[in-house]
Amino acid sequence: MRVEISMQVAEGQQIEVIEAGITVVRGIKTAGVHAGLKRKRRDLALIYSESPAVVVGTFTTNQVKAAPVLVTQARVRGRGVARAIVCNSGNANACNGPQGERDALAMGAAVAKELGLAEEDVLVASTGVIGMPLDMDKVRAGIAAAARELARGREAAAAAVEGIMTTDTVPKEVAVRFRIQGRDCYLAGMAKGSGMIHPNMATMLAFMATDCAVDKEALDRLFREVVSRTFNQVSVDGDTSTNDMALLMANGMAGNHPLTAADPEFPVFARALEYAASQLAKAIARDGEGASKLLEVKVEGASSDEAARTIARSIARSNLVKAAVFGEDANWGRILCAAGYAGIPFRPEGVNIYLGDLQVCEHGAALPFDEAVALEVLRQPEVLIRVTMSEGRGEGVAWGCDLTYDYVKINASYRT
């Protein structure tokens, strides 16, 4: 495993970003197969933990929730222990009435039978077209094939990632290594998401795992906080889906004593989780449907961190801002406007706006700037918008992408 980045957390404590998939976590095996729900690519993934894992999760806030979301949400909030996650792509199993719930339960039951598990230990996810019944003969055959192919290693992890992709153009993976109580621990994740992406989850799925033992209550609280700062800060198109979920399994196979929030090494684990989640979130924004640029919005000096995150989300999701970034037009007025309708009180005269390092607005008013420099900033594959306020010390970041002609083309013919 090649170390890509090493980050200092505290004296003598580092987090290493490594080139690996989710199977780098002890006890995690995966498989990805083509069950026939999609024409060609793999369309079913299976993640298996050799030991029971504490599991926590967050789910879509859409009032219309797909059957697998309801099933998995109940299991996570119930026993909160899992051994496997099964996910199909190509069909969302959403808005299918009672049959949808029966099919979601049947997916879990099929995995449980193949792996000798209790049905309650299997979590279920789906992604794809809404309102079409699942072909359960294909799903069951795919689950049987995936159970036979479960393995560790880079290829098995990559196959699982492909199995959850829909309009994604690139796989999304991350892995980190850190030390807790003198033991090497790993945390890794995989995600999918490209369109129908908006804060409060999106049409994104994120499956993460760690071999570090963590107290369930502390893990649940931390995961919710991290999701609020990462996955919930992504917006591609302003649509919140029916199928979104983010799950984290901690199987404790590193052998450490379970971390609590009061443990002096808990911040090391927290930093590792936040880094991994933020990288997956940024990868989703970068791969927005039809996108050509990643948009990062940083807000500083807001009345609180939550206020800063809300304003950053408002800017990142603005279609006018996104279109301006695509057109490489330094139209900073759209940025200030989007901040203004975020629902957070602030004084416009206390706002400064920067494109990269170039200031384009001062005290909420026009400021002469070099248009050629602004154009060069907006031509880059990653565009940073920074907004400073004079309301307090709150900070927040959000990620989005530009709005291109291709987004309309992709979504105009999504089913076909």
Image: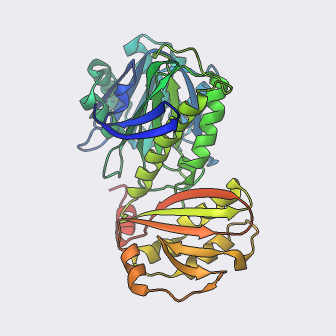
Q: Is residue 379 visible?
A: yes
Name the residue rendered at 36%, 72% in the picture.
405
Name the residue rendered at 73%, 65% in the picture.
344
Q: Quadrant of the N terminus?
A: top left
Above or below — where is 196 with respect to 206?
Answer: below
* Left or right side of 212 for 6: left
Estimate the x, y position of residue 64 in percent, counting from the top left.
Answer: 60, 47
Q: How many marks?
A: 0
Estimate the x, y position of residue 295 in percent, counting from the top left.
Answer: 46, 64
Estimate the x, y position of residue 66 in percent, counting from the top left.
Answer: 54, 41
Depth check, front residue: 79 or 411: 79
Name the residue rendered at 72%, 56% in the picture.
304
Name the residue rendered at 28%, 18% in the picture.
148
Q: Quadrant of the C terminus?
A: bottom left
Estimate the x, y position of residue 93 in percent, counting from the top left.
Answer: 47, 40
Depth check, front residue: 6 or 206: 6
Colouring mode (rainbow / by chain / secondary structure / one colour): rainbow
Name the quadrant containing residue 340.
Answer: bottom right
Q: Is residue 106 visible?
A: no
Above or below — where is 215 with respect to 202?
Answer: above
- Which residue ends up furthest to the top in the rendered image? 116
* Left or right side of 276 for 58: right
Above or below — where is 363 with respect to 58?
Answer: below
